[in-house]
Amino acid sequence: MADKGTSKKVTRVGGDSSSSGTRSFTPTAEAKGSATKFRIIALVLWLIAIGLEVFAIYLLKKPPIVMWQIITLIVADLVFAVAGILLWKKANRFDPASEKEPVRFFIQNQLGVIIAFIAFLPLVILIFTNKDLQGKQKGILGGIAIAALLIAGITGIDFNPPSQEQYAEQTAQVEKLTGKNFVYWTKSGKSYHLYSNCSYINTRRTDEIFEGTVADARKLKNITDLCNRCENQAAKEKGLDVTKIIDTVKDKALDVKNTSAK
């Protein structure tokens, strides 16, 4: 599909964008390597967070209890826990799990929530059951610990977890419209585009446009939405019905999922 171009700076990211008749998604070796690196760092950060929690529990069992020390440990625990969660979620976008393995899919995508409870719930319980703490101290330390638990827990939830099937479906839709796995997006955009000169990304506030595969847009910006204007334009140029394209892609993805599950 011909692209009329844009006057904006266009930066290429990712790898091969040629059409592959996509019916399944397999991350590149580079993407899997990056995901492994992110996960290792995340695990190290989580171990540090849990270590800080253990140290805080140790101090709570050895009166006199120094409030500022416990508060500092809780805050540090939160920083390391959240940093690990964000890296883990990023790794999942580089190397997504398959919906065909529901247990692994859930654990891999919601592990951050589990870690949040491990890193803070024992501490919360100990604070409120500690006989060496006065009511006001329990209120302050307990409130901070609960807040940290909630922040880490909410951050850990992936409300739109990536999956291999989702990537395959989105890629197939783009390839059906353009004949290749190639899209454009911006730093602050929430959609990927089929045309670099789409008016939605050629505005005064846009100084750079990125180009790459659907997976690149997802793993770097977690973009899951195809621009409606680009979709309609591409369909019109090829004389296609957008609704039928979406239904066909979904049917093929469902066939692959059902076949693999047998």
Image: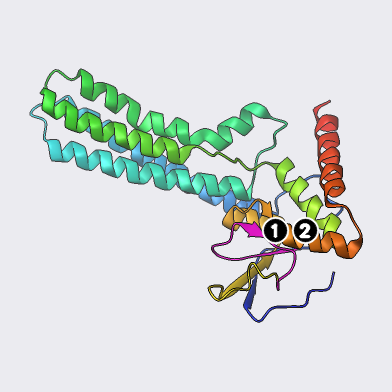
In this rendering, the count of numbered labels is 2
Compared with residue 83, is residue 65 higher up or lower down, i.e. above or below?
Answer: above
The residues bearing labels 1 and 2 have C-alpha atoms spaced at a distance of 6 Å
Compared with residue 78, is residue 221 higher up or lower down, i.e. above or below?
Answer: below
**158 drawn magenta:** no
Q: Is residue 203 visible?
A: yes
Foreground pick, 245 / 77: 245
Badge 1 local density, few (<14 within 10 Å), some, or many (20+)? Answer: some
Q: Which residues are magenta?
A: 180-197
Mark 1 highlights which residue? 227
Identify the disc placed on residue 231: 2
Outermost residue on the left side: it is 64
Position in image of residue 215 (x %, y %): 68, 54
Q: Quadrant of residue 148?
A: top left
Q: Amino acid at mark 1?
A: Cys
Outermost residue on the bottom side: it is 7
Compared with residue 141, is residue 72 higher up or lower down, i.e. above or below?
Answer: below
Identify the disc placed on residue 260: none
Q: Given contact means CB atoms under 8 Å apart, are the residues at marks 1 and 2 in contact?
A: yes
Residue at 27% in and 43% down: 75
Q: Main secondary structure of the magenta part?
A: loop
Residue at 53% in and 73% down: 205
Outermost residue on the right side: it is 239
Badge 2 local density, few (<14 within 10 Å), some, or many (20+)? Answer: some
Foreground pick, 168 / 16: 168
Position in image of residue 252 (x %, y %): 86, 40
Compared with residue 142, is residue 40 higher up or lower down, i.e. above or below?
Answer: below
Q: Quadrant of the C terminus?
A: top right
